[in-house]
């Protein structure tokens, strides 16, 4: 009798142990009854009917990372590049993830790799290297839509690296160097052109200013010569009037003035170092005396 009791107690303990299940945070368990999905156990203590119900799948509901291995992809312009990526996803509906697809991670991996080949195959090499954001967006839309029936939400897909062949990388580097050299030559030529234009503008402005200066100087010289001619004409007219009146001193003044100007020119000429003057001093003094008489006549008030 005691043996039966011990067996019964052991059976009861085992039954209770089998009927109590602790679900950790971030996970959910499916419960199956006779092989059929019944319900889902949330995090915490869960109870099931032993020998009738059992735990089917233990599903991780936290966001997970799926590493997509690198693969060779042919672009639209027949360039072969090596591409790898990473997928971030989260299981939303436990039952669908457990019973709608077999081996969820493998299915998502193959789906992502196939769509990477499709998206990059529709782009040129330059587009595939420069439009990472566009590639990521297209992949996210397609893969998320395809995995929705599996109860999965794909949050992000990121292309980690796109590696062209080594010979293609060298060709691209040479092309980039040539483009930079071309831009540098263009900028240098534009700089020389701008400098020549500025120089020409400066020379033009200097020529204009010089011409304006010479024009103004010529105008002033002409005005000075005009005034000098007027003064000469007035002097000649006054002497003529004096001669007409019989004033011999005016004739002496006119002759003496011209005489002194001639001597001044001969003395300052660079072509003559020595000048012989066969002159009569009395004539020159007489002329100067005539000038003095005229001055006295001018200064004396008329009576």
Image: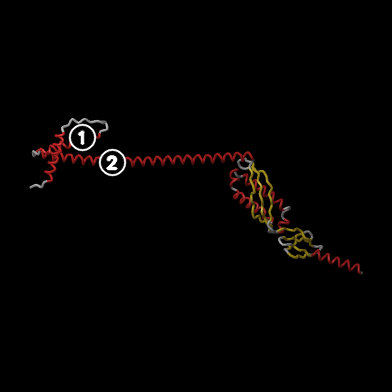
Give neighbour class at mark 2: few <14, some 14-19, many 20+ (Cα, 10 Å).
Answer: few
- Colour basis: secondary structure
User: Looking at the image, which is closer to me, 30 or 132?
Assistant: 132
SS at circle 2: helix
Give neighbour class at mark 1: few <14, some 14-19, many 20+ (Cα, 10 Å).
Answer: few
180 relative position to 216: left or right? right
Q: Position of residue 78 (x, y in %)?
A: 62, 40
User: Looking at the image, which is closer to me, 121 or 262?
Assistant: 262
Marks 2, 1: nearer the viewer: 1
Q: CA distance from mark 2 to mark 1?
A: 29 Å
Q: Picture quarter containing residue 16?
A: bottom right
SS at circle 1: helix
159 relative position to 29: left or right? left
Does 278 appear above or below 246? above
Q: Picture quarter containing residue 165?
A: top right
* Residue at the far right in the pictured view: 1
Q: Position of residue 18 (x, y in %)?
A: 81, 63
Does 25 appear above or below 233? below
Which numbered circle lies on residue 263?
Answer: 1
Q: Which residue is mark 2?
A: 217
Residue under the point 71% across and 52% down: 105
Residue under the point 62% across and 50% down: 136
Q: Position of residue 93 (x, y in %)?
A: 69, 59
User: Looking at the image, which is closer to me, 17 or 111?
Assistant: 17
């Amino acid at each position: 009798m005691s043996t039966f009791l011990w067996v019964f107690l052991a059976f009861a303990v085992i039954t209770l142990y089998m009927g109590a299940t602790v679900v950790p945070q971030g996970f959910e368990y499916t419960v199956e009854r006779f092989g059929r999905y019944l319900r889902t156990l949330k995090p915490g203590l869960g109870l099931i009917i032993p020998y009738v119900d059992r735990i089917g799948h233990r599903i991780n509901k936290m966001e997970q990372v799926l590493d997509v291995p690198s693969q060779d992809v042919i672009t639209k312009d027949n360039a072969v590049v090596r591409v790898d990526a990473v997928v971030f996803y989260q299981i939303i509906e436990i039952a669908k993830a457990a019973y709608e697809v077999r081996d969820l991670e493998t299915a998502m991996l193959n789906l992502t790799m196939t769509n990477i080949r499709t998206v990059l195959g529709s782009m040129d090499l330059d587009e595939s290297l420069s439009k990472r954001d566009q590639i990521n967006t297209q992949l996210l839309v397609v893969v998320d839509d395809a995995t929705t029936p599996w109860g999965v939400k794909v949050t992000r897909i990121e292309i980690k690296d796109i590696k062209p062949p080594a010979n293609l990388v060298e060709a691209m580097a040479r092309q980039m160097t040539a483009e930079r050299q071309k831009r540098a030559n263009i900028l240098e030529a534009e700089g020389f052109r701008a400098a020549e234009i500025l120089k020409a503008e400066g020379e033009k402005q200097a020529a204009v200013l010089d011409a304006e200066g010479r024009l103004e100087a010529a105008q002033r010289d002409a005005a000075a010569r005009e005034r000098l001619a007027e003064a000469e004409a007035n002097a000649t007219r006054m002497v003529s009037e004096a001669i007409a009146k019989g004033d011999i001193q005016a004739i002496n003044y006119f002759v003496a003035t011209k005489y002194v100007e001639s001597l001044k020119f001969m003395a300052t000429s660079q072509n003559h170092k020595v000048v012989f003057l066969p002159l009569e001093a009395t004539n020159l003094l007489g002329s100067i005396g005539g000038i003095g008489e005229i001055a006295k006549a001018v200064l004396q008030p008329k009576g």
